[in-house]
Amino acid sequence: MSHRIVVVGHGMVGHRFLADLAAHRLEGTRTTVLGDEPHPAYNRILLPDVLLGRSDLAGLTLPETPGVRLLRGRRAATIDRLRGVVVDSTGEEHPFDTLVLALGADPVFPTVDGVVGADGNPLPGVAALRTWDDAHRVRSAAEEGARVVVMGGGVLGVEAAVALAAAGSEVTVVHRGSTPLDRQFDADSGAVVRAGLADLGITTLVDVRVSGVERRRDGTLASVRLTDERHIPADLLLVAIGVRPRTRLAEEADLGVRNGILVNDSCRTDDPAIYAIGDCARTPRGCSGLVGPGWEQARVLAHHLAERISGRSRPRPVLGADGGVFRVKAEGLEAVTMGEFPDDEFTPGAARVLSLTDPAGRRRVRLAVADGLLVGATCVGDPQVAADLTVAFDSRTPVPDDPAALLARPLAGASAPASVVDLPETAVVCRCNAVTKSAITAAVAAGADTAEAVANATRASTGCGSCTSDVCRLVSALGEAGGSRSLDRVTVA
Ligand SMILES: Cc1cc2nc3c(=O)[nH]c(=O)nc-3n(C[C@H](O)[C@H](O)[C@H](O)COP(=O)(O)OP(=O)(O)OC[C@H]3O[C@@H](n4cnc5c(N)ncnc54)[C@H](O)[C@@H]3O)c2cc1C
């Protein structure tokens, strides 16, 4: 009898798991997927582009995995562990030998009056940005000239604010910390980010919270009230204060849950037939809320199941992105952070920390160096320096004797910007998918002659998309270097 796999959730990690499992070419398995969104799987990370009007659903859609029974718009309602069955919202039963939960996370809404209804859903004039439907709703509400208050100055809040301002909205960010992006960046970097947001026409109010909203007689939103008693006129309140792993289905099935579905290193819950991956799962390393670790879990689980189901050992998966570099994806606002800084840079033996602060130039660079290597860096407002630092961090290049040289590019006789074409073959071009330059070179050599073909062959540029221009540049440079025939001779590391 065939092995029945049921996957609940067809988001970025559930979708990737299906592709990874298919790559093992297992015989005798039957896979059913329940996804409660009515759409095909799509790249959620690029939803801010939808606010800009730059992407439609087709542009974000991820390729379907053949040979899978995919039920869209179908919610898993209960898990009957005794019978090994998932019951969906239509009452249909889906028996499983292995169940994979990839349920994602829900946006968190504040517990202040007038924001959410009794059912927990946002009231008119209030939205989050988690799904395609959310993005569509926000885009229609935030038409040109609309007044939008973004609650939360973290990465998602900043990315959404920049996109909405570029689309013509009047945007105010309300942040409870003293500088935006304060979870990833130090206070001076955050201050530069705040000034950069002001340059884009965005007001950032700090050290303050939303305490409620005022509505007109017809129920539409009139203004947002702050804890300092200010009232900000608003047509839309966009809430971006974090996410919470979706765990209810697991909780109701009596699986272990603590701020996430508890799993071990193989992504297994306390039921040997049930696994959890992605934003809903809490591994021994915690919950990340990022796609890179979720994709890694998908790969590890596909490998684990392939061995378990086939009874044969298989090549271990190459584990991917180190997750060490984080980039804010907002046009006109360059902000990158990588690695770690010491808690106290004055402690003897701590990494050496250097910084450059140039508020008027909207620049701030901070580095940590230990044992001759770059171990941490943040860079705001200088894409060239950010690119150089990323290469030095990734490739563990020894830093100069005086690491201050890394803080800025010399103005006179500046060397050409670090181009992807000049990087070593081992350099990682697509961080989300851990695709190296050599893998792209190999794909081009095998006949992939467009960026799209390279994306299909290697997955490069299918995550946050920030490497798309590098992939295009590389494909074109490799093509110019002599076409795919001469590329056959390129050594692939
Ligand atoms: C605007 C935005 C920008 C982001 N930017 C970044 C970034 O730059 N870098 C980064 O690493 N991460 C980013 N993230 C986070 C990233 O998108 C998530 O980490 C990733 O989507 C997690 O994938 P997942 O499959 O676990 O969850 P999801 O992609 O949320 O998918 C879960 C799916 O399961 C479905 N589902 C839930 N319950 C059920 C049920 N009972 N039955 C059936 N289906 C169900 C949901 O509807 C959903 O379709 C961003 C997220 C957003 C919203």
Image (cartoon, helix red, strand yellow):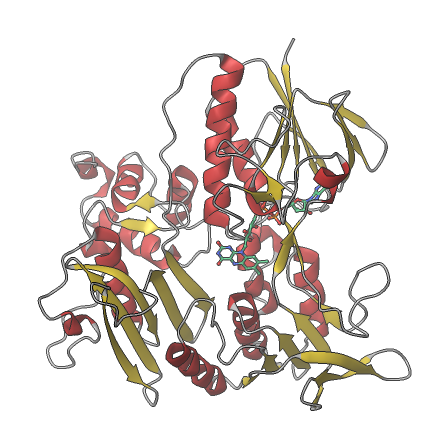
Where 19 falls versus 139 (above or below)? above
Point out residue 381 in the picture as x, y percentages from the top left corner: 35, 77
Point out residue 395 in the picture as x, y percentages from the top left corner: 21, 52
Q: Is residue 236 left or right of residue 361?
A: right
Residue at the (68%, 82%) spot, across then down: 146
Residue at the (30%, 43%) spot, across then down: 440
Q: Nearer the viewer, residue 98 or 238?
A: 98
Which quadrant would the C terminus be assigned to in this image? top left
Point out residue 166 in the picture as x, y percentages from the top left corner: 54, 77
Residue at the (46%, 65%) spot, across then down: 329
Which quadrant would the N terminus be assigned to in this image? top right
- Of all residues, the one furthest to the left in this rendering is 401
Residue 263 falls in image quadrant: top right
Q: Nearer the viewer, residue 374 or 131?
A: 374
Query: How many numbered markers are drawn?
Result: 0
- Of all residues, the one furthest to the front in this rendering is 348
Is residue 328 visible in the rendered image? The answer is yes
Point out residue 420 in the picture as x, y percentages from the top left corner: 25, 56
Where 228 falls versus 168 (above or below)? below
Is residue 25 visible in the rendered image? The answer is no
Where 462 falls versus 146 (above or below)? above
Residue 338 falls in image quadrant: bottom left
Residue at the (29%, 40%) spot, across then down: 439
Q: Nearer the viewer, residue 444 or 295?
A: 295
- Of all residues, the one furthest to the right in this rendering is 217
Q: Is residue 257 left or right of residue 421?
A: right
